[in-house]
């Protein structure tokens, strides 16, 4: 199975309003509630596409109980490390007239040293039956910089590939620990390296030790930058409109599924990552691909 | 004490963002959490201004537990009727750059017939030591039309005055039951009666049986329409800017405090209601008056 690790999950609450008017009061039905967080979305996409995925995350307080309930209902295998801080919420407001979603993401509460130890102990146990390890998403406040580095190292110690989707020091440290693939988006890469050019930024992470850097470029597709040889740029020939939330998680799922199957060719990885990202944009919910996702891959242009 | 009854309370969650951008994702600290609902705000204003207030409301699910916690912390005396439906939330996003607050008010879940009976039984017990009864705020979905009428009738049976702040059929039924004062705002009165002119609309509620109709007109102050004699219009001479949330609740508190003290003169009621509304606009939180609220009353112009 592919082990996804999400240190800072969220309870996703989605309201629908006919039209969102800043400064006004709106009436709405109770929100749709869903266990969220990038690693959970990755696991959902893996489950949909036929890979066995396992979710390791944390849960605290009343929102943590609701997160656990939703995970159980979704039948995704999971282990929740109990933590004292209540699981954060992410509040989304869907505007039915514009189709736009406005999101307030809580930063979350810090984990205690004992809770971090419990999370890493769980990784050490769960990495044994794993075929690939994924670490993704923001970290709680005051998290150690080496959370994702330890994940990459634990994978490496078992001869397993790893994919890390993060930003800043935790991403650099994961690269230094030899993560197989790191996947920032263009803005996150610039924020991490201080370099606006994605190829130059990717070189920083490759020099640090990453096996491959995959940079998502939004509507312009995706760039795979290997340590040697030319970068590969993949994009869908036709423009898309839809819900970009979760597109990056679909890309991570695509990469993890290929790495788990022993495929590490940059062109193959970036091609499927771009295809699944596009299929995620066409699906209504984060963590889902539109039904035709297998056909999208043939429409991806690389160069 | 003044008994406030709130059948559909809310857990108020307030986020702060530097700037609210529709369609974008924002990061925010955990929200400020507060027991909310119009009757709770009325009780807070009464407590601040020196009247003993008692809160009768409902609580359900995890949000109901948080509501109970906050009420206990606030030291406002209260009784919570346990209900199965989780207490609704009201999510506010405060935009630090514009000073505007955008609110999503959940409609809430229905009460069972047994839960309505428990609420009315509690009213029958708590009305005995009361000096005035207040019913305010929206009702849960599928609520009987006579919820506020039964409140006004219970007050009347004990020779007590009542104030009802509602809209639609429950407001009309409360007027029919002889509520001492009904306080819709201009929009609610038009919605209830189908008449745009507030004096004409007020006459409908007076004909139904209300003792006095108080119509809040926003920046234009407030109108008291008695069954006989001329309407009294009160307003603050100077325009105000601030947070209008809770201004109507402050007006209800003003009226209840005077009625409880045996004052029922329409001019006195509308004067204090307008003053406390203005003082609420100048205070940061709903359920609070700005410290100078006693001085504001002398600045109110009536005509």
Image (spheres, coloured by chain):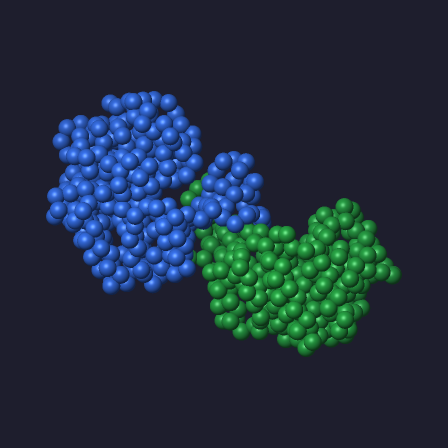
Chain colours: A green, B blue
Question: Looking at the image, is B105 positioned above or below residue A76?
Answer: above
Name the residue nearer the viewer: A282 or A268.
Answer: A268
* Residue at image location 73% in from the left, 69% down from the top: A155
Give the vertical position of A253 relative to B76 (above or below): below
Q: Residue furthest bottom?
A: A129
Q: For this rendering, which residue is in front, A179 or A114?
A: A114
Residue A141: percent from left, percent from top: 61, 52
Q: Residue at x 19, y 45 (%)?
A: B130
Left or right: residue A164 versus residue B205 is right
Residue B235 appears in the figure: no
Relative vertical location of residue B122 with respect to residue B243 in this rendering, above or below: below
Q: Which residue is rendered at x = 75% and y = 57% of the image?
A: A173
Residue B93 shows in the view? yes
| x 58%, y 70%: residue | A79
For this view, does B159 lie left or right of residue B222? left
Q: Nearer the viewer, residue B116 or B49?
A: B49
Determine which quarter of the picture holds residue A165: bottom right
């Amino acid at each position: 199975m592919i082990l996804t690790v999400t240190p800072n999950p969220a309870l996703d609450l989605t309201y629908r309003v006919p039209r969102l008017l800043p400064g006004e009061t709106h009436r709405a039905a109770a929100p749709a509630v869903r266990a969220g967080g990038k690693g959970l979305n990755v696991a959902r996409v893996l489950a949909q596409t036929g890979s066995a995925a396992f979710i390791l995350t944390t849960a605290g307080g009343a929102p943590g109980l609701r997160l656990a309930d939703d995970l159980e209902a979704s039948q995704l295998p999971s282990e929740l490390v109990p933590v004292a801080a209540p699981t954060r919420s992410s509040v989304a407001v869907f505007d039915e007239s514009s189709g736009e979603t406005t999101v307030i993401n809580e930063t979350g509460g810090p984990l205690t040293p004992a809770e971090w130890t419990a999370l890493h102990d769980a990784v050490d146990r769960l990495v044994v039956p794993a075929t690939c390890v994924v670490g993704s998403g923001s970290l709680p406040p005051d998290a150690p910089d080496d959370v994702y580095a330890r994940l990459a190292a634990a994978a490496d110690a078992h001869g397993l590939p790893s994919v890390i989707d993060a930003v800043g020091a935790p991403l650099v440290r994961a690269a230094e620990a030899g993560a197989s693939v790191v996947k920032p988006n263009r803005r996150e890469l610039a924020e991490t390296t201080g370099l606006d050019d994605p190829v130059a930024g990717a070189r920083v992470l490759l020099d640090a030790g990453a096996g491959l850097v995959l940079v998502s470029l939004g509507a312009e597709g995706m760039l795979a930058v290997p340590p040697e040889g030319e970068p590969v740029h993949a994009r869908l020939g036709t423009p898309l409109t839809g819900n970009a939330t979760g597109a990056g998680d679909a890309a991570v799922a695509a990469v993890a599924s290929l790495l788990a199957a022993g495929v590490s060719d940059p062109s193959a990885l970036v091609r499927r990552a771009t295809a699944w990202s596009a299929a995620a944009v066409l699906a209504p919910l984060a963590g889902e691909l539109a039904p035709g996702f297998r056909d999208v891959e043939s429409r991806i242009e690389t160069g």
